[in-house]
Image (cartoon, grey):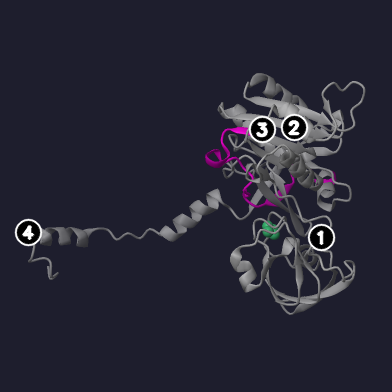
């Protein structure tokens, strides 16, 4: 034993000999770590449609399962998966319970002129395989910060993440309290009505109130919009409870005004991000002197194409066969970041850029609009 320690300490020679005799550790820790990450946070999943459930005249739930016997990656109630279809992708909240990982349910409502919602509803059938991301998103319950007494304002298919949260409470017997105030146009538009009412009847901590804007004469529940008065009456005071809001874009500003009128602090309101602004030109910092419909030139990776100023850069890239990584399409996840090398873009208020994005010229292409001819790096 020639090691310098061998002669200096009693027993050192024996210990060194034992170390020498050990079988070398040949495990590939990098690969094992990668496999674990891929199990819980896969970039892509191939999921088969095992059921298509007609929820309302305009809404279907697609049940997705793995093709093997394994469980799906875990998720937090409120998260979404991004579905890839027809050269683009759309995020859809998982409406099933995170306590049941044999399937994800995605609940899709038909949007007038909505290319992807209509495509899914009209063409996707049992047996079809869809490519999705793993579960993502920050719109989920965090007991540490949000407490265990939740009010959820939902509109239309914005009920999907609330349904996942309610199903989870019912499945695991949580003592969390949850009050869903759910706005729909009429009674036949209410998604999950029978199940919501059955769970609320069976679980003292869960309340569900339906609010209908166009009630017929048989409707006996709350009617109108989700006004401050309606919220106060149904929720019986907010008392600084965390309020989640999910629904069509028009709901967000309206709900913020109503909740603010009730004295609810902004930091106790959580909005699910929901798409690019329908009209970026309505935002205060849209330059007044440019025609939104006029086309400008986008140059990327040596190719150029023309696109109108009021089309999100991400959509314009996809229109031209270029597909940057993307998920939320709402300016939140930052996956779609591109660097603006030349020219000017309007970055919508919805974007949640990092401090370094502005410093190094990055923008979130899903909510950015080319104001001039631009050159970008992916
Ligand atoms: S896709 Fe998430 S920020 Fe653009």
Query: Which numbered disc, 3 or 2, marks the residue that appears first in the sequence?
Result: 2
Is 15 on the left-hand or right-hand side of 101? left
Q: Position of residue 59 (x, y in %)?
A: 81, 38
Residue 10, numbered label: 4
Against 145, residue 4 (above or below) is below
Q: Is residue 63 visible?
A: no
Visible in this render: residue 236? yes
Residue in the picture at 62% in, 42% down:
140
Label 3 crowd bin: few (<14), some (14–19), many (20+), radius 10 Å? some
The answer to whether residue 139 is above or below residue 375 is: above
**Image spot of residue 100 (x, y percent):** 60, 35
Can you tell which quarter of the image residue 294 is in?
Answer: bottom right
State which quarter of the image contains the C terminus.
bottom right
Boundaries of the magenta span:
122-150
Gap in angstroms between the C-alphas marked 3 and 2? 9 Å
* Residue 39 to residue 366: above or below: above
Residue 132's disc number = none
Q: Which residue is mark 3?
A: 238
SS category of the residue bearing label 1: helix
Sequence-wise, the earlier of marks 4 and 2 is 4
| Residue 296 in the image, given as x and y percentages of width and height | 84, 74
In reply to whether residue 148 is colored magenta, the answer given is yes
Name the residue tied to disc 2. Answer: 231
Which quadrant does the N terminus fall into? Answer: bottom left
Between the residue at mark 3 and the residue at mark 1, the CA separation in whole angstroms equals 33 Å
Q: Residues within 10 Å of mark 1 (few under 14, many from 20)?
A: many
């Amino acid at each position: 034993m020639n090691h310098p320690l061998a002669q200096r300490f009693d027993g050192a020679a024996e210990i060194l000999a034992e170390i020498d005799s050990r079988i070398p550790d040949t495990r590939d820790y990098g690969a094992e770590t990668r496999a674990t990450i891929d199990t819980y946070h896969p970039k892509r999943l191939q999921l088969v449609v095992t059921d298509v459930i007609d929820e309302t005249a305009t809404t279907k739930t697609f049940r997705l399962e793995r093709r093997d016997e394994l469980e799906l990656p875990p998720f937090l109630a409120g998260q979404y998966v991004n579905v890839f279809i027809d050269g683009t992708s759309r995020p859809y909240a998982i409406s099933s319970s995170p306590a049941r990982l044999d399937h994800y349910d995605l609940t899709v409502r038909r949007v007038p002129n909505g290319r992807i919602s209509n495509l899914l509803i009209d063409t996707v059938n049992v047996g079809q395989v869809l490519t999705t991301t793993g579960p993502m998103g920050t719109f989920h319950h965090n007991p540490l910060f949000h407490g265990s007494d939740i009010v959820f304002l939902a509109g239309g298919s914005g009920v999907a993440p609330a349904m996942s949260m309610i199903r989870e409470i019912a499945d695991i017997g949580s003592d969390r309290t949850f009050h869903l105030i759910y706005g729909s146009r009429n009674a036949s538009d209410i998604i999950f009505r029978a199940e919501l009412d059955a769970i609320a009847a069976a679980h003292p901590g869960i309340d569900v109130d339906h609010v209908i804007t166009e009630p017929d004469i048989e409707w006996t529940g709350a009617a109108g919009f989700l006004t401050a008065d309606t919220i106060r009456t149904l929720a019986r005071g907010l008392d600084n409870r965390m309020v989640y809001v999910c629904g069509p874009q028009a709901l967000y500003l309206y709900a913020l005004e109503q909740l603010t009128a009730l004295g609810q602090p902004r930091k106790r309101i959580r909005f699910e991000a929901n798409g690019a602004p329908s009209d970026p030109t309505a935002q205060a910092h849209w330059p007044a002197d440019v025609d939104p419909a006029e086309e400008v030139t986008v140059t990327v990776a040596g190719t150029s194409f023309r696109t109108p100023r009021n089309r999100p850069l991400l959509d314009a890239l996809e229109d031209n066969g270029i597909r940057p990584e993307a998920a939320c399409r709402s300016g939140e996840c930052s996956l779609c970041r591109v660097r603006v090398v030349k020219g000017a873009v309007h970055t919508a208020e919805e974007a949640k850029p990092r401090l370094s994005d502005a410093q190094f010229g990055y923008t979130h292409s899903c909510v950015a609009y080319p104001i001039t001819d631009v050159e970008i790096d992916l």
